[in-house]
Amino acid sequence: MIGNSLPEYVFIRLCIYFLRYTTPICLAGLAILTAVQHDFHHDPAPTPLALLSSPGSTTARIIIGYAIADLLYAVFVWRPYNRRLRDETEHPPPLSRADRRALVGRCLAHVPDLERYLRLWFLGADASEIRRENVREFLLWAFFDRRPRPRPKSGSESESGSGPAVKKDGEEGLPEEDEEDEAELDEYVALIERNLGRRVEPGRGAAEGGLRLTLDPVETRYRSLIWYLIIGLVDVVTHFQLAWGGFQYHAQPHAAFHSVIPHRAQNLFASRHSAAPDLGYWHRPHTAKDKLPVVFLHGIGVGLWTYVSFLSGINEHKVHDDNDDEQIGIIAIEYLPVSFRLTGAPLSKSEFLEQVTAILEAHGWDRFVLVTHSYGSVLATHMFQSATLGPRIEAAVLIDPVSILLHLPDVAVNFTRRKPQRANEWMLWYFASMDPGVAHCLGRHFFWKDNIVWKEDLVNAIEAPAPSTGSSETGADLGSARRKRRVAVSLAENDLIVDTLTIAQYLAGDEEWYLGSTGKGSVEQNGVGEIIASAAKSGRGGHVTKDGIELMWFPGLDHAQVFSAKENRDRLCSVIQRYCAK
């Protein structure tokens, strides 16, 4: 993530402007080139056609050629792709009443400031404008997957000038609430009032239904053809870097070549193919018999390019008893819908789990350490909750996770609705939030109830599965003993997406988490303050909470900046390697 200095602000704004308006800039450049070559004294101004046919007109040919290509791309690629952003969301089956009641209670029990919680979900609306019907409408989306049924105008609504609920765009695919829902809604509104310590005013205020991610219109911003040429170049560079580092590429089937823009030539010439039709991946063979291999899930960005040095460092960061001839195996899965490419729809939860299982079975990996970054924690949640994959996750390292306490509004608001002001916010807004693939993934295929993870899900006691009958790289005798999963969570103090202080306080539990005068995270336990950042020097990497979660705090860093400095990467790799030890 970029910093917030004035030069960085100017740089990122210029980049955004250039990528949005490349063709007009090119045509303006062509006009300037025409004017420069014009002989004001003798010759008339050359036409573009004459300029193209004149000697030394290579620059003009390139500019006009690109402008034509960009126009064709906008008409035949960009516009058709973006039409699907208007499609209705296919919501998963609703929760049972018992599960819903338990989820509502659990969420409200972990809201540090309910007034702020409501105001943020309603995009900063004044508390007086968040009334009973507004809250009911939000709860219907958040917990019921339903839309409000039309109601006759009440007296209080007449006095306030607000009308009854009207069906909005995006709600057509949702069933209407019924009479049983109404009684349950009243129960939840009463619970909110109890926690607020005040009554929620009747009627409907100007706050409307708040942020309803899967129902609201999906917004994107245009990016020209040159952007995808850059992504294609970065993809090729990443391919060679990983191949040079000892990784083997397992491509999607040849049939997937035309479904991804920019096209990936490496898929046509790959000698190995993925066991999963929609997931390519990079594999580093596992030869360390006394260690577990690693499965890595990346975040929103340009794929694996950000993580090349980090993935290589997992085996470079040796401890004293390492055998140099043995290496920790790694499978780094490519999830293209969040990799700044134009692709098909994201995999459903069941499809993703099925295809990851197929990849693991192809390599005989019965147990592994799961490492994720940012959005990868969402996919990891599905794996934690899976009856087949969950028990196989022996340990997990979550870096900048977005799925912990996902019911809080910070991640959704900061990523999809915040108006950018600083350099890092502009970078996040244009390159990630407004990317058409990312926006489609989050706006039509992101269901927070399926994606939220609680600390109990992270560390719950699990029963190891029976060993695979096929060949196995891990070669371990798993047994049937129950064990508790080892978990580390890495948080950046200045994360512009996640409220990391609240996450740290939640993970610390009854221990009192606070920030010291140096900006370093501390835990107050039995009257003794422990500086988390200093724990790395003792070889532990982070503070271990009473629930067994190793909490790693990086002062002064923003989202994803932990991968920038080798010192921080080494600290992460040290923890991962320790977790790989059987």
Image: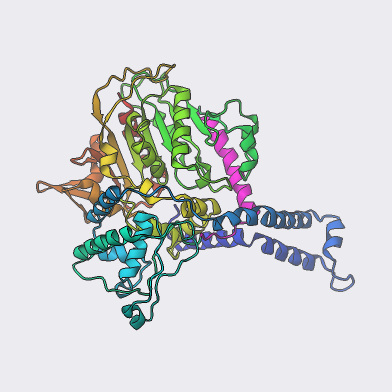
Magenta span has 222? yes
- Count how many numbered circles sit on residues in the image: 0
Give the residues in magenta. 218-245
Residue 6, given in percent of the width and then of the height, sits at 46, 63
Q: Quadrant location of residue 249?
A: top right
Residue 53 seen in this snapshot: yes
Left or right: 470, with 225 as reference point: left
Q: Quadrant of residue 298?
A: top left
Its colouring scheme is rainbow
Residue 402 in view of the camera = no
The residue located at (26%, 45%) in the rendering is 533
Q: Is residue 408 magenta?
A: no
Dominant secondary structure, magenta? helix
Outermost residue on the right side: it is: 42
- For the residue pair 131 and 493, the one nearer the viewer reads as 131
Q: Quadrant of the C terminus?
A: top left
User: What residue is at 61 percent from the left and 48 percent from the top?
Assistant: 230
